[in-house]
Amino acid sequence: MGLEPGTMSPLQLSVYWRLSLVFVFTSFLFFLDIFTAAIAADTCSHGNGSGPDALNAAMNQSGPGDESEGQADWRTDNRQRDSVCAWTDWLSYGQTVFMVGQLLGSLIGGEISDRYGKRPVLLVCVCVHALCGLVPAVLPQPLVFLAVRCLTGVCCCCINICSFSLAVEWTPPAARLWPSAVLPFCFSVGTMVGAPLAWLSPTWTHLHLSLALPQLVCLPLYFSIPESPRWLLLKRKMDVLDHYRSNSPEDKQCVDLLLHSSSSDLQKPFEVQKEEPHTGPAPSDIIHLRHPTILLRLFIMSYLSAASALTYFGICMNIGSFGVGVYSAQFFSGLSEAPCLLVPLVRLGRRPISMLALFLSGAACFVSLLLSRYDGEPVLVMGLALLGKLCILAAIFISTLYAIELFPTVVRQRCVSLVNLCFRLGCLVNTLVPPNPDGAISLAAMAVYSSGPIIGCGLCLLLPETSGVTLPDSVEDCDRQPHSQAPSGGHDEKQTFII
């Protein structure tokens, strides 16, 4: 007897709500460069200043007997401003260094999570991520700030890899699209929460403390996140699986249900390993990677990842270029992504939703480009750009799940890591695109943001439909995936409960 539809086991619930909290906090430091630039511009250019007028203003706010106290407060604030204002030019490199860190994380994240498990890597990265928000408040130095931004990028990427893998592997095929929608939604919630926190922070120190302290307080909650049952079975850690099964009858049913389709397939590699022990990649892995089916899918998914990254982060990081305030624009940027939570309710399958999202994103960015060239209303231009951002976000989280379902088990993590690497390269290219002298997004950049998704829409026609289909374990399984239409949402499978 299985779990009733619409219910979750305690372990599943533990995974989902804790990973959701992780994603809320991840967005705080993801867009930190936007906030630090705004804080530095306000403090160093339009703040109280550092000359005699600022001293007189500080003293006038206090009474006659508080003159010495007002002067001391002004000197303290002035020293704090000078410590950051002396190197504001370094802040322009923060975004680039952060994307370089994400690129490094994509190179090592999949490998170390496969070797040591997704749970320990996630816990280490979450702890380091929280500390990275605290260090610049204590040590406001340019080289320290850039080093911390690079380390933050590495942690963000590893958190993303481990979180999506954990959430998907704790979910049956019939409901695999839900975690891929819920986690980006929580990231958007974090964007909306981080914007007012940054707006209420008058100084550099307040900004970093307000974004770091909530993460530090919540760190103990993450140690209850369970490991992936599929990884535990792969590593033969049956004692941990037995412990999970003993938590409750619901957990036992859930673990057995998740491992039912994979236990026989995962048993084969261990039988071969006992007969022919070896180190390094198996020869069959290389053969799989060279197969035309795998190469075609790898090329298409890599292109989609790079094009989606260019569009999404190009709009995110230039949200202040639409003639609207940075903090309000960042808040509405997060709010515009909220409807992505409704995407799993659309019963169209992976390929149709991906094509629709990519086309709408490219079309919205193109119309926004036309209006901006003809002096359209800034609010309308930003609204269309945010619509394109919403659609490309939907394409991103669908493609994240799509990539997991397209590649066979023996090379899945390697292929997903390569696709993720292309995504990070797209992010890095964004930071190298110089803006126009007036601060607006350049014509060439917006042309790329609109054309890239539309080309990707056409490439999706070469991919099969994977909705509700069991994860492939070989190239033969990949070739058997349907190309015409989606299955009936996976309802014919034994995994019938949803989130």
Image (spheres, rainbow, N blue to C red):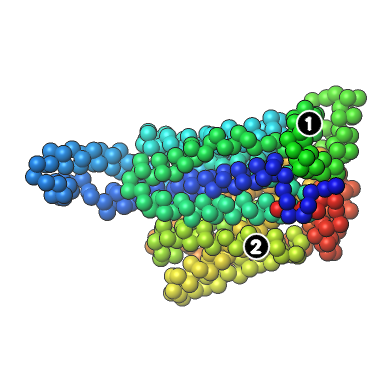
- Residue 439 in percent (x, y) is at 41, 60
Distance from the alpha carbon under mark 1 to that under mark 2 = 36 Å
The outermost residue toward the left is 64
266 left or right, relative to 27: right
Which residue is more in the foreground, 175 or 28? 175
Residue at point 69%, 30% (across, down)? 116
| Residue located 85% across and 47% down the image | 1
N-terminal of the pair, mark 1 or mark 2, is: 1
Residue that numbered label 2 is attached to: 342
Q: Which residue is mark 1?
A: 242
Look at label 1 and name its amino acid: Asp
Give 218 or 189, whichever is nearer the viewer: 218
Which amino acid type is shown beneath numbered disc 2? Answer: Leu
- Up-down relation of residue 88 to residue 118 (above or below): below
* Residue 193 visible: yes
Q: Is residue 59 above or below residue 465?
A: above
Q: Residues within 10 Å of mark 2 (few under 14, many from 20)?
A: few
Q: Position of residue 143 (x, y in %)?
A: 41, 35
Q: Circles 1 and 2: CB distance less than 8 Å? A: no
Residue at 8% across / 45% down in the picture?
64
Of the pair 227 and 366, the residue shown nearer to us: 227
346 on left or right of 465: left
